[in-house]
Amino acid sequence: MPNWLLPESIADVLPSEARKIEELRRQLLDHFRLYGYELVMPPMLEYLESLLTGAGQDTDLRTFKLVDQMSGRTMGIRADMTTQVARIDAHLLNRTSVTRLCYAGSVLQTLPSGLHATREPLQIGAEIYGHAGLEADAEIQQLALASLRLAGFSRVRLDLCHVGVLQAIIADDAQASRQASQLFALLQAKDIPDLEAISAYFSPITRKALLALPGLYGDVSVLEQARSVLPPLPGIAKALDELQILVELAADADVIIDLADLRGYHYHSGVMFAAYLPGLPNAVARGGRYDHVGEAFGRARPATGFSMDLRELARLMPGAPRKPAVRAPWSTEPGLREKIGELREAGEIVIQRLPGHDNDLDEFDCDRAVVFDNGNWIVQNLG
């Protein structure tokens, strides 16, 4: 095998794509700051017990593990930054007030998350800690949709779900509660035959509600349908009311309700959402409430947030035009160095042609040149 081949689902990022990713990262972080989010930078690897605290089995399976040569302890390379940011809020900042944090950095995963996905996403996201009300969920949803618009995507489909519906259905059925993990997986897969089999010995009310969930999929009318076919439990009513408000606040997106779409249920505790773009099978953004993650760090804090992969977003964006630049000769002549310095201070890209070489550039279009004319170095337009 040639030694330059990279592992499967791992790829280099070349100049034009790298520029798109970096410019989008700067735009989004600046946009988050307008909402009051503070930037944090968690480490790439941590001791495994800290990295996986409260993260669930899915994250454990996606995490690369290695032995620390200094301590002999097992470490993990982060596969997701959400729990790291929760740890920072719980232990390092330790604030009592509402805290808004954002982040951007590479993560590494043992398996790609979807079709054509990379195992090295560049994750960017935002989280709110300290407020249990729906207002925080609404802000996170608004920020996620605004971020996609900022990236140039106007047609967005928003899928909404709520873990509270299933939690309320099985709360008073001991046998169903013991098989919660299997129920989550079967509902997510909409596996009705196995759902019928596993629920055969549940209470009739629980069984009927569980079998109704896979069919509760569609536009906002699903919420009224759910109120009529699901039992009138307070937890269900509260969850459906919250979804109704979030639908109304997402008027610029095509909203789909799917009460069986329970991806990430391992640590989510309330509203969950996923954003999709036309023609792409994978969600470009995921988010939701995860109030219980902080408990694992010894400090329970209400929490909600979202994240997306910058590399995936940039891949979907149109190619950026080349940047105008100025070509200059290479020389130690003081006047030339001063002229180049002035141009760069003014924000111009100046590329000096090294002796004996032409510039072969993907990123820059040298439409002007620095030339010596009548005793002065001037900028001349190129035809």
Image (tube, rainbow, N blue to C red):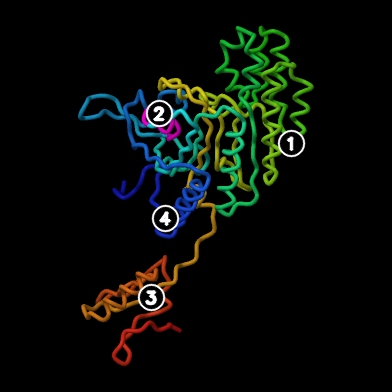
First in sequence: mark 1 or mark 2? 2
Q: Nearer the viewer, residue 365 or 28?
A: 28
**How far apart, in angstroms, are the residues tagged by discs 1 and 2?**
41 Å
The amino acid marked with disc number 2 is Asn
First in sequence: mark 3 or mark 1? 1
First in sequence: mark 3 or mark 4? 4
Residue 378 sits in which quadrant? bottom left
Q: Outermost residue, front direction?
A: 97
Q: Nearer the viewer's eye, disc 1 or disc 2?
A: 2
**How far apart, in angstroms, are the residues tagged by discs 3 and 2?**
50 Å
Name the residue that disc number 1 marks.
219
**How far apart, in angstroms, are the residues tagged by discs 2 and 4?**
36 Å
The amino acid marked with disc number 1 is Asp
Q: Residues within 10 Å of mark 2 (few under 14, many from 20)?
A: few
Q: Nearer the viewer's eye, disc 3 or disc 2?
A: 2
The amino acid marked with disc number 4 is Ala
**Contact, CB < 8 Å: mark 3 with mark 4?**
no
Name the residue that disc number 2 marks.
94
Which region shows up in magenta? 80-92
**Contact, CB < 8 Å: mark 3 with mark 1?**
no
Name the residue that disc number 4 marks.
18
Name the residue that disc number 3 marks.
326
First in sequence: mark 1 or mark 4? 4
Q: Nearer the viewer's eye, disc 3 or disc 4?
A: 3
Q: Residues within 10 Å of mark 1 (few under 14, many from 20)?
A: some
Where is residue 26 drawn, in percent x and y? 45, 52
Dot 3: what SS? strand
The amino acid marked with disc number 3 is Val
Where is residue 230 drawn, in percent x and y? 74, 19
**How far apart, in angstroms, are the residues tagged by discs 3 and 1?**
54 Å
